[in-house]
Image (cartoon, rainbow, N blue to C red):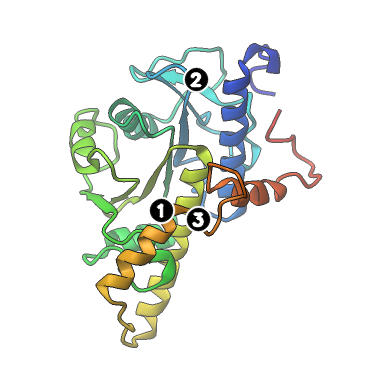
Amino acid sequence: MLMQDLTPKTFSDAERQVREDLAAAYRLVAHYGMEDSIYTHISARVPGAEDQFLINPFGMLFRDITASSLVKIDTEGRILEPSPYDVNPAGFTIHSAVHMARHDAMCVLHTHTVAGVAVSSLACGLQPCNQWALQFHNRVVYHDFEGIALDHGERERLIADLGPTARVLILRNHGLVTLGRTVAEAFILMHNLERACRVQLAIQASGQPIHPVSEEVCELTARQYESGDSNRLPGAADPDAREWRALLQRLEQPTASASFRD
């Protein structure tokens, strides 16, 4: 197993929890068919360290990622703990840019799904044509394609396009990015964004006119999603707790592979 010299006692309780959530997110991305072989990435900031984040070992399938196998790296690109793996250079460019500029983003999730890449390649981008999409009404920003993200100079332009508050970034002709204050939030945003893209493409493929939704209802729906009140557990501050708990149940079933918590 990766990083055999690291045991759960090596990590603080806070870092252990982030590692388990991040490993779970990788496995859920694989479960829902949103992975791209060994490419794309999910990163999470190391608790208490503004310039350090955890990311996938380059070359490991998402379905096999565990809490201990995640690679700890800083925003200068230095791997901070022993690992037989390195980090995807394009992944470092995108994720380090966000973590350097957006300290409110604890987790950054990036995908290359067929539906996501397709919508990112449409001139019209994401359209307010279904309930999932309305969550992101007037809350999506775009960054133009500059080739594979290997030029660290692109980080400044990506940060400028992202701005100080956006949680959804569409990389033109490339894919989707979500930012979360928790791993759960980043994953749930991406899960809904992916489904919004799939529905949009299905509607466009039908050739039929889209039934319009008024601007007033679009904004109302987006605010309803933001409040989280329809999903919040009684007495809980985190509106994603109920859904995240249910999603983790998918990963708790006995399988031949190691647990994501390992």
Q: Pointer 2: what residue?
A: 72
Q: CA distance from mark 1 to mark 3?
A: 8 Å
* C-alpha gap between disc 3 and disc 2: 35 Å
Residue where numbered disc 1 is placed: 226
Quadrant of the snapshot with the C terminus: top right
Query: Gap between marks 1 and 2, in whole Å?
Result: 31 Å
Q: Nearer the viewer, residue 185 or 98?
A: 185
Q: Are marks 1 and 2 in contact (CB under 8 Å)?
A: no
Circle 3 SS class: loop
Q: Is residue 246 above or below residue 96?
A: below
Callout 3 amino acid: Asp
Quick one: which residue is furthest to the front in this view? Answer: 235
Name the residue: 26% across, 59% down: 138
Left or right: where does residue 154 sit relative to residue 228? left
Instruction: Tell which circle, 1 or 2, labels the residue nearer the N-terminal end.
Output: 2
Total labels drawn:
3
Secondary structure beneath dot 2 equals strand
The percent position of residue 73, horizontal first and vertical second, equals: 44, 19
* Left or right position of 90 against 153: right
Indicate the quadrant containing the N terminus: top left, top right, bottom left or bottom right: top right
Q: Nearer the viewer, residue 18 or 260?
A: 18
Give the residue at mark 3. 229
**Above or below for 252 versus 77:** below
* Residue sitting farthest toward the bottom: 208
Mark 2 residue crowding within 10 angstroms, few (<14) / some (14–19) / many (20+) = many
Q: Say which of marks 1 and 3 sits in front.
A: 3
Give how far across and how far down residue 236 sits, in percent: 58, 43
